[in-house]
Amino acid sequence: MNDKAHLILVVDDYQDAREMYAEYLQFSGFRVAEAKNGNEAVEQAFALKPDLILMDLSLPGMDGWEATRRLKADDSTKHIPIVALTGHALAGASEGAKRAGCDSFVTKPCLPDDLVVEVRRMLNTVKQG
Amino acid sequence: MSSLHMRTASRAAAPLVSHAARLELLEYYLAHHEDLVRCAQASVDWLARHTGVRRALCLAVDSEASQLVGLAGAGITIDDVELFSLSLSETQDPLVRALFSAEPTVVRPPRVNGHTTRVNVFGASPFTAVPLRGARGTDDEAVGLLLVRPGTSVGSDLTWLATVLGQKIDQIRGRGSLAEEVRKLRRERALFFTIINAVTDPIMLTDTEGRLIVANARAEKLFAATEEESEGRRRAVELNNMLFSAALSRTVVEAPSEARELLLVDPSDGSDLLFEVLSTTVEDPREGTGIVSVLRNITDLRRATEQIEENYQKLRIAEVAVRAERDRLNLIIDSVADPIIVTDQAGATVLMNAPAEELFTVAPDAEDLAQRTVQSNDAHFSSFISGLLLGETGPGEIRRGEIGLMNPSTSEQIPVEAIAGKVLTETGELTAVVTILHDRREALERTRLYEQLRVASDELQMRVQSATAELATQNELLRRQAIELEQASRLKSQFLANMSHEFRTPLNAILGYTHMLLQGVAGDLAANVKRQLTRIDSNGRHLLTIINEILDITRIEAGKMPMQVSEFNLNELVSEVMTELDPVIARSRLAVSARLSADAPIMSTDRQKVKQIVVNLLTNALKFTHQGGVEIGVNFEPGKHMAAVAVRDSGIGIAPENHEKIFEDFRQVDDSPSRQYGGTGLGLAICRRLANALGGRITLQSNIGQGSTFTLSIPAEAPQ
């Protein structure tokens, strides 16, 4: 663990899933912050300016789509890649996520390992961009 | 034309002229003392009969006309007699000269002493001209001439005759003019012929052998023809003569006085003429036995008779026909079950058929009730018919009415409908009224039955209506049930979709933590713990697959998997699938190859769905094949706009009876709980649904132990 490690904001209302991803990301060498709803996600994002946000879309209160829209609407946060996490495999979910401004889309269930692969891919993309 | 021909029958000359014969002639003179011609005729006839003279002509001097005229002839024609005329001024004529001769002169025509007489009655033969002298003796001029032939000798009989005839002529002439006598006679003769010619029937005098002596004009047309007339006419005349002769001989022999029929030929047109011949034998002192025949033309009569006969036959036939017609009419009338009554203009019954008789006649010895019933029926009928007879109904109109009658034998009430029509003559006079009585009981019964039928029908209709209404209610219920079912189905799908989502959240954690443990997040693990975690992991993954597939099916059924059409290359898609499944292929240790299409298979359809199918088919092939290989072939037919992906394996194969079964939900060939191969059994069911959604299908060629070929065939462009 070091300060240079990327900071990932994991947003999920389901504690087990949130902590599991957080734990595995930390195990994989990332710094992790957590938020359990849309408001917290926006507050944390503004406060911490994470390198990447894992955003569950179905959230109580402000949902993932709304939080994404707000973050992408703000100059201070719009550069942060947001990977959408959703259990809704129904058609249109990914489209909605992209319209809201998500940069990537991962369907749950998603193994921690696969998630880490996607996170690294997105961080590389930002780096190259 | 002359109306008269006369000739004498040939006779043998009498050998000796007795005193009795001379006396007979003198008696004739006395009896006909004023008739010069008759006396002359009797004289020449006597000469012919009693002497050897065959031909004779008696001439007398007409002092007033100063000429010689013919009085009578024998053996020559009457014309030769009547037309004879010689002027006394012809002094050189041998006959005129003979008048002044004392002795008989022999004349030899044509030339006598250089002079020729005009007289040629004897032809070229010589004849003797005997002068007839009056009572004053030989000095005077003769009163006439008797020309005889042959003129060989002038016997005493001739001399005697010349003497008595001369004196007779002189005697008669002394009382009157000779010319007047002759003229009177000729008038009589002419009258006679006028009379017989006026008779339209042929009249003839013939000898007993049928030779013609005298005939009237009508007879001549049938029996006489001159040389100038046509061949046909002459032949007809000849035939008629033969027929007549034959008929005459039969008449004479068989039945002299009976009329008999004779068929002759009309010489003018050859048609048959039927005559009735009536022949009478006449005795003439001069001519001997002759036969007078009167022929009556009965051709027309016969024709008329035949016509009458024919007409009679026709009448008979017509009568038979009429009778047959009447019989037939009677049969028809009698065969009509309804009573028919024909009445005359006065209302009296003319004719009725058997059914009518049952109502309107009764035996005289029947009981009183029947008698009264018939009277009552009669009164009802008369009252009905009187309206028609009184002219209340126009011509050609039919009068209808209802009459209450009663059967006399059973006293049964019979309501009848009476239908009456007038029968008019050509002039419009009423001759009869025909009435038909129609028993209405049947009609009433029919009406009643019809009413029952109508009630039944109405009832049936009501039942049908209520049944229909019930059916409509049922239909409505069914419709609502269908809607409810649909809603339920949709709810079910929604429920399953929600369920699988809810399943996934905990499953995500289970799989995630298991994975983390196996990744060594909690430090190194003992081998048995690692094996146990691996079991959790594989079962969790299986559960996830099941949940995903159930989710797919419910999405498809709920119509929540819309087409996402994009353009892509099918070769590239297959390569991509093979790359993604590379770890699985490597594990299978099978030879897996791809045979891509030579043409660029550019598709315009839902790429995700096609990919899902190909992945599924390839995964299945790898799962059910233990040795050998798997080949994916891409076929593209641009002309047909069809593309196919065939996945061929050398696996266990599928029996034909199971080819359909494996496409059903949750099915594998082996359904037992302890089945060898994993999987939900939903894969092919999903593939089939997806292929259908793409407008294509999945086909299978396989058999046990011979491997399987699953082929996805889809249109290059997705259906709209």
Image: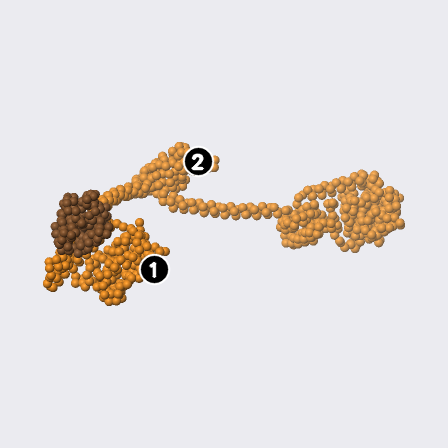
Q: Position of residue B398 (x, y in %)?
A: 39, 37
Q: CA distance from mark 1 to mark 2?
A: 110 Å
Q: Which residue bears the numbered disc 1?
A: B598
Q: Is residue B351 above or below residue B525?
A: above
Q: Nearer the viewer, residue B242 or A20?
A: A20
Q: Nearer the viewer, residue A81 or B651?
A: A81
| Mark closer to the chain start, 1 or 2 | 2
Colour chain B appears in: orange
Rate crowding at label 1 as few (under 14), some (14 to 19) or many (20 or more) other CA atoms within 10 Å.
few
Q: Which residue is located at x 35 percent, y 36 percent?
A: B401
For the N terminus of chain A, which image quadrant? Answer: bottom left
Q: Which chain is brown?
A: A
Q: Quadrant of residue B143?
A: top right
Q: Which residue is located at x 22 percent, y 50 percent?
A: A126
Q: Which residue is located at x 26 percent, y 60 percent?
A: B578
Q: Which residue is located at x 55 percent, y 46 percent?
A: B308
Q: Which residue bears the numbered disc 2?
A: B430
Q: Position of residue B395 (x, y in %)?
A: 43, 35
Q: Nearer the viewer, residue B18 or A57?
A: A57
Q: State the scheme by which the image is colored.
A: by chain
The secondary element bearing badge 2 is classed as strand
Q: Is residue A21 left or right of residue B70?
A: left
Q: Position of residue B622 (x, y in %)?
A: 23, 62
Residue type, label 2: Leu
Chain for numbered disc 1: B
The secondary element bearing badge 1 is classed as loop
Chain for numbered disc 2: B
Rate crowding at label 2 as few (under 14), some (14 to 19) or many (20 or more) other CA atoms within 10 Å.
some
Give the foreground label among 1 and 2: 1
Q: Is residue B279 left or right of residue A57?
A: right
Q: Position of residue B561 (x, y in %)?
A: 24, 50
* Labels in figure, total: 2
